[in-house]
């Protein structure tokens, strides 16, 4: 069957992915082999593939495919996350567009809409990953709201509550007024913004004196319950024990004293608003101040906002400043840069808010998780993230795990009695009823008397169990799968969720299995454009991954993504990288077509050139394989790809195939052809993790294979010794061949015409590849001579050893002029190097490596001068 002249990526990708799925190559079951396990960072259930997913999942697939080739029982577990905030926001927006109010239809009906949305849009991203070639065990696909996953989450919550690690508290939390829910500290991004510092005059009660206070949030004065001065500040000595009047609302508030106040900042005193600032809340608790919350859940002002009730906080800010100025309370306004907290999910400016919430104590759980990473139990790649991890774990705060949403795992707390402080925590309502009866002493309580907490758990509270729950390790901690697949091997994820997810998974692993959840954490960089901007829909600088795959093929895009993606460093993505990857795919395909196009004869002896080429390439392959294995062991995936790329493009396609290629119209001997095919198969094996489709296509085209002989489950090449000497000798020969070709081009000497090559006898000159030099340079006579090359116009090929004597119509004067110019330049260059080396300060103070480079330059220049003078001499 004829080989297609053009590689059809789309056709090939569909064919082989279907073949892999049909033959169940991705699926793993417990057996006697050593497992290699990766769990996918679960993307949002309603998400679509973006460039970050492309990078992350390509790296995972490379690791999994290589593990499969190395004989491990490779298991890559896919799945999606229910993404409480993001999904609920989408469902609410959809209902709103249909004229439906979430709060009017109630929880049960809303959840039905959420499930309908999930079933319709969920899992799209997993289907898209198949286009990329992701070899996940799709039979194991999990969703964080699956029944068994939900049971695991509830079981863990109840267990941690019973251990005293989960508690309910009235605390200052981060409130997202757009999503109308609390956020953990880690879900708040702080960014510098240009704002204003407003200086406001508060009247002192019973006098005409005013006290000026600086604030960035003038609207919050309506919630002020005190003014605080530093007791050591002599400027305000006379105000101790007095009261002030809040502008506009005319509320009388006490002037309190506390050393917390920075006498150097602003005016040296501050307004205290306990409901809207954590530090103010601490002061309020200490001095037993009133707490006045002026905001509704959507950050509009409530009844305490007086005539501003119902208006948005930022609208009020502008309007209240006008009123303050009009009534003479505004002293001055200054430009001010401060850090503003924004929601990681919605981008809304966060409001500090006092609220009853559920928290998880983290200090105790953080200790083994910190020790594991600081020691050598878990490796972070690259290590530069170690200090960041350490800082966060040493300063960890309790995790606010409750969210004011309906989509998610409803908190298993059941209120009875007064409905506020009387509650029990249980895995089921029946168990809760028994506990409530016991706690209350009321045996008459019924299920209808219990009210389950309306809040749901933070999404991360389910995903922190992911490496265990996907193998049912929480509900059945002794099942054979969790004992076999856990701990997993590698985790590939983004640095921005090092704390959200990675640290918490480590905590959960030690809490519930007493061991790490994974050995290595590979932290990818952020995909950015050429201007270093993070790729995003809003900036319009992110290409559609599926369109890229359609244009360049999955293999081309995978190579393009990985060509410049060192661990932990941002990837400056350029579509030209995918173009380069696509060109590489075509190069491999065309090289295969060349090989399959050769006629083979059993009657021909193997030429010396072919034998040498095979010996050299086998050693070169083994040397590169050693480098590749080293790169993989250090998670330098980009370097492993580059080493493979250079081996195949440069050494195999550009040199090896040219060396063994039979003369035009002539057949190849069967021995060489057999070796060429064997070498091709070895190349395909190391290429396969990066380029699974084109390699499987070529592998299957080479010969008819059974399903047990597919490339995806072939055996990774074994490392053997290699001949460094032959590699060095070929490198020398390659320079000579390149030099011969360069002179042919410069002097317009056709490759069809044989030329002679004179070589000066030298004890270091290797003759190993003379036959190869002769073939690839089309050399007629190769002669070793003593002394120098005389009697003919000659051109230096390499250093001062190899010369091509040329007899014929050449403009001698033009050549002499050209050589003289090169000689003058080189002599000038040598003088500059000599000057530098004669400078004692330079030689004594410069790094040894730098001095060595200058000495090499000197030696090279001297050799070149000698050769140029010899060329001039031969011209007469």
Image: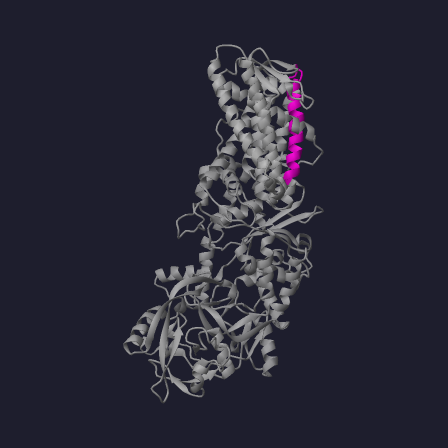
Judge from the rendering whether residue 12 lies leftward or rightward of residue 438; answer left or right: left
**Does residue 205 lie above or below 755 as drawn?**
below
Asked where in the image residue 243 lies, by quadrant, the reply is bottom left
**Does residue 493 lie above or below 788 as drawn?**
below
Residue at the extreme bottom: 206
Q: Is residue 840 visible?
A: yes
x, y (%) of residue 315? 33, 69
x, y (%) of residue 584? 52, 33
x, y (%) of residue 620? 65, 31
| Residue 619 among magenta residues | yes
**Does residue 632 lie above or below 368 as drawn?**
above
Q: Residue at x 49, y 84 (%)?
A: 288
Judge from the rendering whether residue 695 lies leftward or rightward of residue 785; answer left or right: left
Q: Is residue 596 visible?
A: no
| Residue 311 among magenta residues | no
Asked where in the image residue 25 lies, by quadrant, the reply is top right
Magenta region, residue range: 601-628
Q: Nearer the viewer, residue 486 or 58?
A: 58
Q: Nearer the viewer, residue 365 or 103?
A: 365
Tag count: 0
**Does residue 655 lie above or below 325 as drawn?**
above
């Amino acid at each position: 069957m004829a080989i297609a002249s053009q590689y059809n990526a789309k056709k090939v990708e569909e064919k082989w992915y279907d073949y892999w799925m049909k033959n169940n190559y991705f699926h793993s079951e417990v057996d006697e082999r050593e497992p290699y396990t990766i769990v996918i960072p679960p993307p949002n259930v309603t998400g679509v593939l973006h460039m970050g997913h492309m990078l992350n999942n390509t790296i995972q697939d490379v690791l999994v495919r290589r593990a499969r080739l190395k004989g491990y029982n490779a298991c890559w577990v896919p799945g999606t996350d229910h993404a409480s905030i993001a999904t609920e926001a989408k469902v609410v927006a959809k209902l709103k567009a249909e004229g439906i109010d979430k709060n009017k239809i109630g929880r049960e009906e809303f959840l039905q809409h959420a499930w309908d949305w999930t079933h319709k849009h969920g899992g799209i991203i997993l289907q898209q990953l198949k286009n990329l070639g992701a070899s996940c065990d799709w039979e194991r696909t999990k969703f964080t709201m699956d029944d068994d996953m939900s049971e695991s989450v509830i079981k863990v919550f109840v267990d941690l509550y019973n251990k005293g690690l989960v508690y309910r508290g009235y605390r200052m939390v981060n409130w997202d007024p757009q999503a109308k829910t609390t956020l953990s500290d880690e879900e708040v991004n702080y960014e510098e913004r240009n704002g204003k510092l407003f200086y406001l005059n508060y009247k002192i009660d019973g006098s005409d004196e005013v006290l000026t206070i600086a604030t960035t949030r003038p609207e919050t004065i309506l919630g002020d319950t005190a003014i605080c001065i530093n007791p050591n500040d002599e400027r305000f000595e006379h105000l101790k024990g007095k009261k002030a009047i809040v502008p506009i609302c005319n509320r009388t508030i006490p002037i309190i004293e506390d050393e917390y106040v920075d006498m150097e900042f602003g005016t040296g005193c501050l307004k205290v608003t306990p409901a809207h600032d954590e530090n103010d809340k601490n002061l309020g608790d200490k001095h037993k101040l009133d707490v006045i919350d002026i905001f509704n859940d959507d950050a509009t002002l409530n009844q305490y906002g007086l005539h501003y009730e119902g208006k948005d906080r930022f609208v009020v800010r502008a309007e209240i400043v006008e009123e303050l100025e009009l009534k003479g309370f505004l002293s001055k306004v200054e430009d001010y840069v401060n850090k503003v907290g924004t929601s990681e999910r919605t981008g809304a400016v966060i409001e500090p808010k006092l609220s009853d919430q559920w928290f998880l104590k983290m200090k105790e759980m953080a200790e083994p998780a910190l020790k594991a990473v600081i020691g050598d139990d878990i490796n972070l790649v690259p290590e530069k993230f170690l200090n960041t991890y350490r800082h966060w774990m040493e300063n960890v705060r309790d995790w606010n795990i409750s969210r004011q949403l309906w989509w998610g795992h409803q908190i298993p707390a059941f209120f009875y009695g007064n409905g506020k402080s009387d509650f029990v925590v249980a895995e089921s309502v029946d168990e809760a009823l028994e506990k409530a009866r016991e706690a209350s002493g009321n045996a008459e309580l019924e299920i209808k008397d219990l009210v389950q907490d309306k809040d749901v758990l933070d999404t991360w509270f389910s995903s922190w169990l992911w490496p265990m729950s996907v193998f049912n390790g929480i509900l059945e901690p002794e099942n054979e799968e969790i004992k076999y697949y856990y701990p997993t091997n590698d985790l590939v994820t983004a640095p921005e969720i090092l704390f959200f997810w990675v640290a918490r998974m480590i905590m959960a692993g030690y809490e519930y299995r007493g061991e790490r959840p994974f050995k290595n954490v590979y932290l990818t960089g952020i995909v950015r454009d050429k201007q270093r901007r993070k790729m995003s829909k809003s900036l319009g600088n992110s290409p559609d991954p599926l369109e890229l795959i359609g244009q360049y093929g999955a293999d081309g895009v995978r190579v393009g993504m990985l060509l410049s993606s060192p661990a932990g460093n941002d990837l400056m993505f350029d579509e030209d990288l995918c173009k380069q990857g696509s060109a590489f795919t075509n190069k491999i395909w065309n090289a295969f077509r060349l090989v399959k196009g050769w006629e083979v004869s059993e009657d021909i002896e193997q030429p010396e050139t072919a034998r040498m080429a095979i010996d050299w390439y086998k050693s070169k392959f083994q040397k590169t394989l050693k480098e590749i294995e080293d790169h993989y062991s250090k998670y330098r995936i980009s370097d492993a790809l580059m080493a493979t790329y250079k081996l195949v493009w440069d050494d195999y396609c550009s040199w090896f195939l040219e060396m063994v290629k039979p003369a035009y119209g002539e057949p190849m001997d069967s021995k060489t052809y057999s070796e060429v095919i064997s070498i091709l198969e070895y190349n395909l094996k190391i290429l396969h993790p990066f380029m699974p489709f084109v390699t499987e296509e070529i592998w299957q085209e080479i010969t008819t294979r059974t399903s047990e002989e597919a490339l995806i489950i072939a055996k990774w090449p074994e490392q053997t010794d290699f001949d460094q000497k032959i590699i060095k000798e070929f490198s020398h020969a390659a320079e000579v061949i390149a030099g011969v070709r360069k002179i042919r081009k410069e002097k317009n000497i056709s490759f069809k015409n044989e030329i002679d090559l004179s070589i000066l006898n030298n004890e270091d000159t290797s003759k190993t590849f003379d036959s190869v030099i002769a073939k690839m340079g089309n050399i007629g006579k190769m002669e070793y001579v003593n002394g120098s090359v005389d009697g003919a116009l000659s051109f230096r090929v390499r250093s001062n050893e190899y010369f091509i004597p040329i007899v014929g119509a050449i403009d001698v004067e033009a050549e002499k002029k050209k050589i003289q110019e090169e000689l003058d330049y080189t002599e000038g260059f040598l003088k500059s190097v000599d000057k530098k080396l004669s400078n004692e300060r330079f030689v004594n103070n410069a790094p040894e490596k730098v001095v060595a480079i200058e000495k090499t330059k000197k030696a090279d220049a001297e050799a070149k001068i000698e050769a140029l003078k010899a060329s001039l001499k031969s011209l007469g």
